[in-house]
């Protein structure tokens, strides 16, 4: 079946089997491999993308369900001249170690800051609760989000 | 089959003024256009500074992680690539009577199957080679691979696994390590289930205990823990026209991985290339080959690149996990809390295969007495086979287990003698030049410093 | 009622393989503009090894971290390495890199010496210069020397070497020997809050003081310690693989295998002990595994301080703690 949606501002479409998940659609049909497959059942958050303003586990969402929606993936954060403030803070403060949970974390963080530009420590932890990380212990990730939020408010 | 994805060309803006400037001016894309990346960014101070040691330099690979540009194995695609999945054992301990892959092979979309008989040398293991690549005579835990399928998609491969018929003959299942010690049912006959042991002896522990004012006897037990690397194990195998095989693998040690491949495939090392890309977390669980030989052979059979990624369930059931320890500590101290003698007996649940148990039992035994000056010591450890998931290398190799035991007992001793927990440790801790349990002279020792620094930072008031 | 408690645990941990040889080899190539390439057979598993190893090479050559490009993980093009295990990368691979960089640097010293009118052993590499020891105003930029070495002298500045920690085998009956060349030490102190009506344990704060010799990259060391502590918290309170009577895992998924999320992490105060190990590359040791070692012990000791119960089997789930509290209350009654 034909699925048409906007990814990072661009209209994209592909003809896919109806059971195709949004994650598979992005990774295999659109070659956007930023979102990762960690568990395929919505437990780990490595597949997090933003659909119509809400962060979702794309491994448990059918691509068909996203038909007509606006999807933002990690590939849509940077521009030719600069990194997104979140990407900059994550890199500078050492919040990315193996990086596998990173793209999911960044998308959850983006969605949080889009809605709440000045989150408390608890609000940040709560927003990340669905993204598992084994390398960092989350500490530097939370610091980086606070840092990016501060920079975004100042801009 | 899907058609090629389409793109709306109106979204991209190409600005070309006239023919001449078109030849000179670069093609410009709107700045806000996504799916692109910044090519020149100011580098941080730390990366530009000399001297380099001590700089909190940011990582160039972290930049790529943040952009989503890092290519992990699962992100890599080759033309004509197919996908493999491995069938796991349905039994914890059984003889394999027969494996019938014919129905799976007949499925549309399936390119090839593989069983253990087709593997030139069907054993591997970092310490000794007691583990089959694919079980063909006996399965010893539910994570044992029994057969593999390569198909046009992961879905078809997964479906094809269900069509493989395996006939098992049950063998008694041994789950309790203390039961396994009795050797009533052998898991790797004719070997005893006790497959490795370690002894460390120093001074005269019985004399030391006899001279002690107090003796403490405690038992501590720890559980199975899984690494949970966020990236599951993944590998890709492909050959070239010169009979050279390349493996892309999430393995943490490619030099030894290539040796393992050479051994299992009976191929010279010069015909094997192993590439380790950026790995999404290892923690000890990606330190031995898993399905690389299987993929190489499936790729050879089908003439196509073959990729296999572990499912999250495979990670738990088939990749290695941390050894549970049963630890008996008997410690003799004087009135001031100084340890005079320590006797330790440990049983490691060694899982179905040896894997990195040799290292775990060695390190665990050496570290078991703690960072303390003890003249009279006796440590005895045993690792036994059980019909559970293979226990292997995991961050610490036995150290978290023994630390839990020796530090818990230290607090018991402190409480009974009415000595502050920080104080009792200071009285026993290694110093520069102290002798270890193996009589090695230790240098660069900072136990005391770390205790005092931590206590100050915490605000620990000695009682 | 919530009761607080504090617990302390210290530990020691070795670097490298137990007695067995575990060598690493490395190649350093200095380019004609004074930047360099490092070839190492190790694999980046997320800890930042490649950045740290690049810093070690840069330090020996007197250039900046950004000047070194690190190539890794390909048996066709990079030299052998025993692998990213046993916290050995910074120490063993690092030492191999120091030796390889020194070999490349020696070629630069020999090319520069006649130009600077001194002997090669009077030179040092610092701040992107090859300069005279004790008389730094006489120097040449490293780029000039590298260019000169390759195109005039005809000797490109390339060095290869390997390193293996010296050990002594352990006696099979007594275990006496020298299994490792160096060890690291650490202390962690945990503050917990235990609810004595549910047995639930919350770790409020952990102070971790670790030894890693000279830290090559303090930010990355801190990241390792924080990550290790999160594994330790999971080991202490949540994680457990359970088997049924037929040897089948009951919880082989992330819904039922509980591990720490962002909501489970305590406040962390991570510090390093000031130390320098002369046997390590520029004084460094290692840090990968020691980070996960004392956490569970510190938390168990803190639980005892809070509610007076000794948990002797991990993990200390709420059920276990509650059962122990009830047993204690019954005994005291």
Image (cartoon, helix red, strand yellow):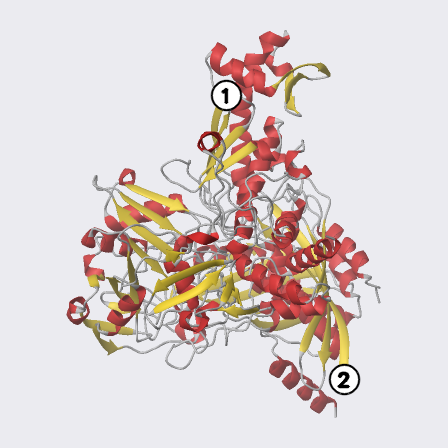
Between B60 and B267, the one lying in front of the other is B60
Q: Residue at x 46, y 29 (%)?
A: B20
Between C104 and B73, the one lying in front of the other is B73
Corner quadrant of residue A115: bottom right
Residue B316, given in percent of the width and then of the height, sits at 43, 68
Q: Which residue is mark 2?
A: C1
Relative to A101, does residue A93 appear above or below in the rendering? Answer: above
Q: Residue at x 55, y 14 (%)?
A: C110
Q: Which residue is mark 1?
A: C157
Q: How many marks?
A: 2
Q: Is residue A28 left or right of residue A86?
A: left
Q: Is residue B450 visible?
A: yes
Residue C99, given in percent of the width and then of the height, sits at 53, 29
Q: Chain of mark 2?
A: C
Q: Is residue B197 left or right of residue B166?
A: right
Q: Chain of mark 1?
A: C
- As helix, strand or loop, the secondary structure at mark 2 comes to loop
Residue B236, given in percent of the width and then of the height, sits at 33, 52
Between C128 and B207, the one lying in front of the other is C128
Residue B394, given in percent of the width and then of the height, sits at 50, 59
Q: Is residue B215 visible?
A: no
N-terminal label among 2 and 1: 2
């Amino acid at each position: 079946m034909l699925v048409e949606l906007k990814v990072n501002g661009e209209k994209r479409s592909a003809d896919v089997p109806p059971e195709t998940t949004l994650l598979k659609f992005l990774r295999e049909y659109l070659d956007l491999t930023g979102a990762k497959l960690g568990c395929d059942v919505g437990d780990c958050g490595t597949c997090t993308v933003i659909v119509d303003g809400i962060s979702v586990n794309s491994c448990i969402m059918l691509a068909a369900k996203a038909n007509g929606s606006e999807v933002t993936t990690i590939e849509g954060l940077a521009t030719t001249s600069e990194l997104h403030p979140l990407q900059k803070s994550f890199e500078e403060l050492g919040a990315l170690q193996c990086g596998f949970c990173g793209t999911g974390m960044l998308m959850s963080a983006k969605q949080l800051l889009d809605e709440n530009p000045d989150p408390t420590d608890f609000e940040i932890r709560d927003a990340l609760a669905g993204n598992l990380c084994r390398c960092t212990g989350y500490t530097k990730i939370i610091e980086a989000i606070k840092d990016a939020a501060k920079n975004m408010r100042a801009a | 089959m899907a058609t090629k994805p389409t793109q709306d060309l109106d979204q991209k803006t190409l600005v070309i003024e006239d023919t001449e400037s078109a030849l000179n001016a670069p093609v410009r894309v709107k700045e806000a256009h996504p799916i692109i990346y910044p090519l020149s960014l100011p580098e941080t101070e730390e990366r530009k500074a000399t001297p380099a040691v001590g700089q909190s330099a940011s990582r160039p690979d972290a930049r790529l992680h943040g952009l989503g540009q890092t290519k992990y194995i699962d992100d890599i695609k080759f033309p004509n690539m197919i996908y493999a999945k491995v069938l796991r054992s349905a039994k914890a301990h059984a003889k394999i009577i027969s494996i019938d892959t014919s129905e799976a092979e007949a499925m549309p979309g399936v390119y090839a199957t593989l069983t253990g008989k087709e593997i030139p040398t069907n054993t591997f293991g970092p310490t000794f080679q007691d583990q089959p690549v694919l079980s063909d005579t006996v399965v010893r835990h539910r994570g044992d691979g029994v057969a593999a399928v390569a198909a046009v998609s992961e879905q078809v491969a997964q479906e094809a696994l269900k069509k493989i018929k395996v006939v098992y003959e049950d063998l008694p299942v041994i789950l309790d390590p203390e039961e396994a010690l009795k050797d009533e049912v052998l898991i790797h006959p004719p070997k005893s289930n006790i497959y490795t042991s370690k002894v460390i002896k120093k001074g005269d522990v019985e004399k030391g205990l006899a001279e002690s004012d107090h003796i403490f006897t405690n038992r501590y037990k720890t559980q199975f823990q899984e690494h949970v690397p966020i990236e599951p194990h993944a590998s890709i195998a492909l050959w070239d026209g010169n009979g050279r095989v390349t493996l892309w693998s999430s393995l943490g040690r490619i030099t030894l991985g290539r040796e393992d491949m050479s051994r299992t495939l009976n191929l010279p090392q010069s015909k094997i290339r192993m590439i380790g890309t950026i790995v999404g977390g290892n923690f000890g669980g990606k330190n031995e080959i898993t399905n690389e030989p299987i993929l190489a052979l499936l790729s050879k059979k089908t003439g196509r690149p073959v990729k296999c990624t572990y499912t999250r369930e495979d990670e738990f059931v088939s990749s290695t996990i941390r050894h549970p320890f049963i630890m008996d500590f008997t410690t003799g101290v004087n009135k001031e809390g100084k340890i005079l003698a320590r006797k330790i007996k440990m049983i490691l649940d060694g899982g179905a295969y040896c894997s990195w148990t040799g290292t775990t039992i060695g390190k665990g035994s050496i570290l078991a007495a703690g960072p303390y000056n003890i003249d009279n010591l006796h440590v005895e450890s045993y690792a036994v086979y059980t019909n559970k998931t293979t226990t292997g290398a995991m961050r610490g190799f036995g150290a978290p287990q023994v630390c839990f035991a020796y530090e818990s007992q230290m607090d018991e001793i402190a409480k009974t003698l009415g000595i502050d927990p920080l104080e009792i440790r200071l009285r026993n801790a290694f110093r520069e030049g102290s002798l270890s349990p193996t009589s090695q002279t230790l240098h660069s020792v900072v136990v005391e410093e770390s205790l005092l620094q931590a206590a100050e930072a915490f605000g620990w008031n000695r009682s | 009622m919530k009761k607080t408690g504090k617990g302390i645990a210290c530990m020691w941990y070795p670097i490298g393989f137990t007695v067995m040889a575990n060598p690493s080899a490395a190649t350093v190539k200095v380019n004609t503009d004074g930047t360099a390439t490092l070839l190492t057979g190790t694999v980046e598993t997320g800890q930042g090894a490649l950045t740290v190893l690049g810093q070690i090479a840069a330090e020996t050559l007197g250039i900046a971290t950004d000047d070194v490009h690190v190539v890794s993980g390909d048996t066709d093009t990079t030299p052998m390495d025993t692998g990213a295990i046993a916290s050995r990368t910074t120490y063993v691979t690092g030492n191999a890199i120091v030796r390889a960089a020194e070999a490349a640097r020696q070629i630069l010293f020999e090319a520069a010496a006649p130009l600077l009118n001194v002997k090669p052993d009077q030179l040092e590499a610092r701040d992107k210069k090859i300069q005279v020891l004790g008389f730094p105003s006489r120097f040449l930029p490293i780029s000039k020397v590298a260019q000169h070495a390759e195109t005039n002298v005809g000797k490109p500045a390339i060095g290869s070497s390997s390193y293996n920690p010296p050990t002594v085998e352990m006696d099979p009956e007594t275990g006496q020997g020298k299994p490792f060349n160096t060890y690291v030490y650490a202390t962690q102190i945990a503050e917990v809050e235990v609810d004595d009506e549910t047995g639930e344990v919350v770790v409020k704060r952990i102070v971790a003081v670790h030894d890693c010799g000279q830290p090559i990259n303090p930010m990355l060391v801190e990241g390792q310690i924080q990550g290790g502590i999160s594994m330790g918290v999971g080991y202490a309170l949540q994680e457990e693989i359970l088997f049924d009577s037929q040897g089948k895992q009951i919880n082989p998924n992330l819904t039922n295998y509980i591990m720490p999320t962002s909501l489970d992490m305590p406040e962390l105060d991570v510090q390093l002990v000031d130390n320098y190990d002369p046997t390590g590359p520029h004084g460094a040791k290692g840090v990968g595994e020691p980070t996960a070692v004392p956490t569970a012990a510190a938390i168990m000791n803190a639980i005892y301080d809070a509610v007076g119960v000794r948990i002797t089997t991990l993990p200390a789930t709420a059920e276990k703690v509650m059962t122990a509290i009830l047993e204690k209350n019954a005994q005291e009654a």
